[in-house]
Each structure stands twice: as structure tokens, then as C-alpha cells.
């Protein structure tokens, strides 16, 4: 039987990091998989919980969490009831909170093998987990799933950047919820102030741990070229492309089926094989 539980950690600005985990009862210490969600994402999106169950059944303790400023709350973790918090998020904050989750794992009483702590970062968090792995020896292996390779190129430039600075806020439409998602200009300022540390490809060059790069070759949100760039930069990486797969590997939100979509099922099997051997 799968054991599952919820925890609340204290994140940036005293905001909550909502975290859950699941695993099969065992008399052995279990390797850990920590899943980090991407932009406009959350831990309970789509088929992520089903993915967690697959890892648990394969003998891993699977953890997923919401970044404290992802726009969700403890009471309403689905979607984005707190757009004020969302507007104050930035990359540096997510790097620090990923390390905070690693701290929590180290001090927890869960039945885990603390020499086998593995990170999975989807989309934007592919960059976050790359940066963390490059600078934290507690990470055993890294998996970037449809991961971003360059944050700088994803910011506006020219007139749009000037307008953002002038107004102090920029809005991005969430196509699924219809919300106008606000970004304060501090998001860009934080990146520029910490650009060396937040340049994904530069950090990837420092990674000594095994690194699996998984990407759909029909990804509409993060082009497959990002996977090739990351593979070239990360010295211990292997690249696996999933034919015709999109950014979320065939999943959607909400996901009402009790089986993973085929592309995500294939990705999960690749990830399990990579972590086992």
C-alpha cells in the first residue's frame, strides 16, 4: 500500500511551501525523487500525482511541492488565487526554495537513503534544478524534463522591456484559466543582479552528477533546441527525445484518467531506468 502525506514548510517571506510525498512501505531506505514544477505550474497539475504513484510503485519515495510564490495557497493549492504572491516570484527565490526542500529531506525522519536524492525539473524548473545540481553535492542525479536552457532569452527586450520598467508590472495571459498573470519588474532586476548564477548553460558546465535530458520533439513551449544546448553544455548528460511529444507529454489539466498518457508513461519509464542504473 502506498503511504502518502502532506507537509507545510516555511518558504520565502514566511509564505508556505506545500509539499506531499508518497512511497510503498518498505524495510529498506528508499531513494528519493523530488519533482519541481514549472512556470504557471503547481504540484497537483494534470497527471503529476499519477506520475508520483508510478515512481512510488517502482521503489522510490516521490516528493512534489509548490514554490511559495507560485500563486497558490495552502487552502487553495490548485491554480492561482494569489496573484500578488505570483507577481513577486523570481528565479533566485526558486533556487533557494529548492535547496530548502533538500534541507528538509536531510532532517526528516522519512525512510530514505540520503545518498540517493534525485531532482526532476519540468520546464522552467529544468533551469532551476540544473543550477541547484551544479552547486549542491547532495543531489545524486538530475533529470530535466522539457527543460529551459536560457532564461535571458525568455525576457522581453527593446520597447517591451522599457514599457515593463516604466509601468513596473507586465501581464502574461494564462490561456487555460484566462487570468492575467502579473510580473513585477523586480523579476528582471533579480535576474540581471544574479545573471552569472542564473545562466543555465554556464551552470550546467559545472555538473558532475549524471544528468538525463528528456524532451518532446514537438514541444510548443520550450523548443527542442534547448535540450540540445543543455546536452552540449552538461558534461555527464544523456539526451532522450520523445517522438511527437508536446511540452506536457500528452497530459492536460484536469487529468481524469487513471493511466498516464503514453508520452508521459514513456518518459517515466526512461526516468526510472536512469535512476536505477
Image (cartoon, rainbow, N blue to C red):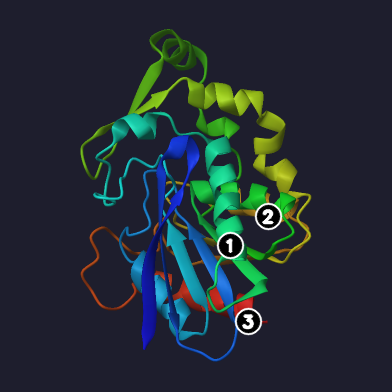
Q: Number of marks in the image?
A: 3
Q: Secondary structure at mark 2?
A: helix
Question: Which one is nearer the viewer's eye here, 212 or 4?
Answer: 4
Q: Which mark is residue 277?
A: none
Residue 189 locus on image (x, y percent): 56, 21
Disc 1 marks which residue?
A: 119
Pointer 2 local density, CA inside 10 Å: few below 14, some 14–19, many at least 20 = many
- Which residue shows up at 41% across the image and 14% down it? 168
Query: From the viewer's perspective, is 93 left or right of 206?
Result: left
- Answer with mark 3 or mark 2, whichever residue precedes in sequence: 2
Q: Secondary structure at mark 1?
A: strand
Residue 182 locus on image (x, y percent): 34, 27
Q: CA distance from mark 3 to mark 2?
A: 18 Å
Question: Which one is nearer the viewer's eye here, 241 or 253?
Answer: 253
Query: From the viewer's perspective, is 175 left or right of 244?
Result: left
Q: CA distance from mark 3 to mark 1?
A: 14 Å
For residue 40, above or below residue 249: above
Disc 3 marks which residue?
A: 276
For residue 169, above or below residue 129: above
Q: CA distance from mark 2 to mark 1?
A: 8 Å
Could you tell me if the residues under marks 2 and 1 are in contact, i.e. CB atoms within 8 Å? yes
Pointer 3 local density, CA inside 10 Å: few below 14, some 14–19, many at least 20 = few
Disc 2 marks which residue?
A: 133
Residue 134 locus on image (x, y percent): 72, 51
Query: From the viewer's perspective, is 88 left or right of 144?
Result: left
Query: From the viewer's perspective, is 18 left or right of 210?
Result: left
Amino acid at each position: 500500500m502506498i503511504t502518502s502525506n502532506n507537509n507545510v514548510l516555511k518558504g520565502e517571506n514566511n509564505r508556505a511551501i506545500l509539499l506531499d510525498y508518497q512511497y510503498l512501505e518498505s524495510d529498506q531506505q528508499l531513494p528519493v525523487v523530488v519533482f519541481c514544477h514549472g512556470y504557471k505550474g503547481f504540484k497537483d497539475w494534470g497527471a503529476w500525482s499519477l506520475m508520483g504513484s508510478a515512481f512510488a510503485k517502482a521503489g522510490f519515495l516521490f516528493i512534489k511541492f509548490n514554490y511559495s510564490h507560485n500563486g497558490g495557497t495552502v487552502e487553495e493549492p490548485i491554480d492561482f488565487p494569489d496573484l500578488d504572491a505570483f507577481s513577486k516570484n523570481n528565479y533566485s527565490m526558486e533556487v533557494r526554495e529548492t535547496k530548502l526542500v533538500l534541507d528538509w529531506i536531510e532532517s526528516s525522519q522519512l525512510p530514505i537513503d540520503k545518498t540517493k536524492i534525485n531532482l526532476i525539473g519540468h520546464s522552467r524548473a529544468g533551469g532551476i534544478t540544473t543550477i541547484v545540481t551544479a552547486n549542491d553535492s547532495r543531489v545524486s542525479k538530475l533529470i530535466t524534463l522539457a527543460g529551459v536552457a536560457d532564461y535571458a532569452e525568455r525576457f522581453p527586450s527593446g520597447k517591451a522591456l522599457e514599457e515593463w520598467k516604466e509601468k513596473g508590472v507586465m501581464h502574461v495571459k494564462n490561456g487555460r484559466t484566462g487570468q492575467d498573470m502579473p510580473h513585477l519588474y523586480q523579476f528582471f532586476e533579480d535576474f540581471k543582479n544574479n545573471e552569472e548564477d542564473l545562466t543555465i548553460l554556464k551552470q550546467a558546465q559545472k555538473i558532475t552528477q549524471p544528468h538525463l535530458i528528456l524532451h518532446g520533439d514537438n514541444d510548443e513551449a520550450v523548443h527542442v533546441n534547448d535540450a540540445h544546448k543543455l546536452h552540449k553544455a552538461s558534461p555527464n548528460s544523456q539526451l532522450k527525445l520523445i517522438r511527437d511529444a508536446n511540452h506536457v507529454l500528452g497530459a492536460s489539466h484536469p487529468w481524469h484518467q487513471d493511466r498516464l498518457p503514453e508520452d508521459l508513461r514513456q518518459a517515466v519509464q526512461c526516468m526510472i531506468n536512469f535512476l536505477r542504473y
